Image (cartoon, helix red, strand yellow):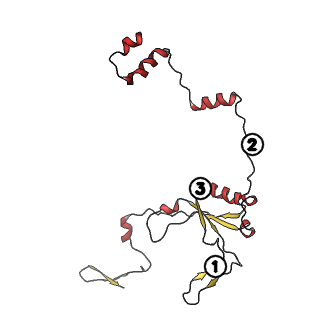
Amino acid sequence: MISRVLLRGRSAASYPSITRAYSTKNTVPQKTTHDENIKEHKASGLTTPHPPKDVLTAEVISGAPETLQRRQVRIYKPTKNTMQSGTYNTHQWRVDFDILQGGGRWEHPLMGWSSSADYMQGTHVKFQSKEAAIHFCEKQGWDYFVSKPRSPKFKTKQYAANYYHCEYDLPHLITELIRTTAAGKVRLAHTK
């Protein structure tokens, strides 16, 4: 009866809000942090910590040929392309296969293209981090070596440094002091 009196003239969308108001107690909820919830959950004994497992190599179940199972790969961070000014493709790590010694390399006699019988030579895999690439190589059972990334070295330079006097000959322009004229003016001669 109370609900009929309260709900008379109201839309159906207000029913849940009114029933919620009558069904809940007037208590303030306690705020807990995420760390406190994790501590309570661990203390309850519902979860058991698992020790870290050894890496099971995929060569056991992959079915890959034996020639691929013990390949050596290189893990590196690619450098910036010299034809582009952007550095977008240099943020990931890559895994490339080394060239096999008996890989059957030959050169096309007419066109001069070089070819290879090694089907993994042109394959590369990209990763977001060095650790992910190392873990993948260990999981595949590949021998790997990591190349250190090269970072560009920037020298702070002022615009006035373009006009400093150099003791040695400039490669594009040789400047020499000819002589002081009788009027005391200095004349510079530029030769290529």
- Which amino acid, by three-letter code, is at mark 2? Pro
Badge 2 marks a residue whose secondary structure is loop
Crowdedness near tag 3: few (<14), some (14–19) or many (≥20) residues, C-alpha within 10 Å: few
Tell me which numbered mark, 1 or 2, is placed earlier along the sequence. Answer: 2
- What's the distance in space between the residues labelled 3 and 1, CA to CA? 30 Å
Instruction: Kindly identify which numbered label has been placed on residue 129.
Output: 3
In the picture, the quarter occupied by the N terminus is: top left
Query: In terms of image quadrants, where is residue 185?
Result: bottom left
Indicate the position of residue 183 as horizontal and vertical percent values: 23, 81
Indicate the position of residue 125 as horizontal and vertical percent values: 60, 63
Indicate the position of residue 186 as horizontal and vertical percent values: 29, 79
- Which amino acid, by three-letter code, is at mark 3? Ser
Which residue in the structure is indicated by mark 2?
A: 51
Reply above or below: 8 against 75.
above
Query: In terms of image quadrants, where is residue 41?
Result: top right
Badge 1 marks a residue whose secondary structure is loop
Which residue in the structure is indicated by mark 1?
A: 116
Residue at point 69%, 28% (across, down): 43
Of badges 1 and 2, the one in the foreground is 1
* CB under 8 Å between discs 3 and 1: no
Left or right: residue 15 versus residue 109 is left
Residue at point 73%, 40% (across, down): 50
Indicate the position of residue 25 as horizontal and vertical percent values: 50, 14
Residue at point 38%, 23% (across, down): 12
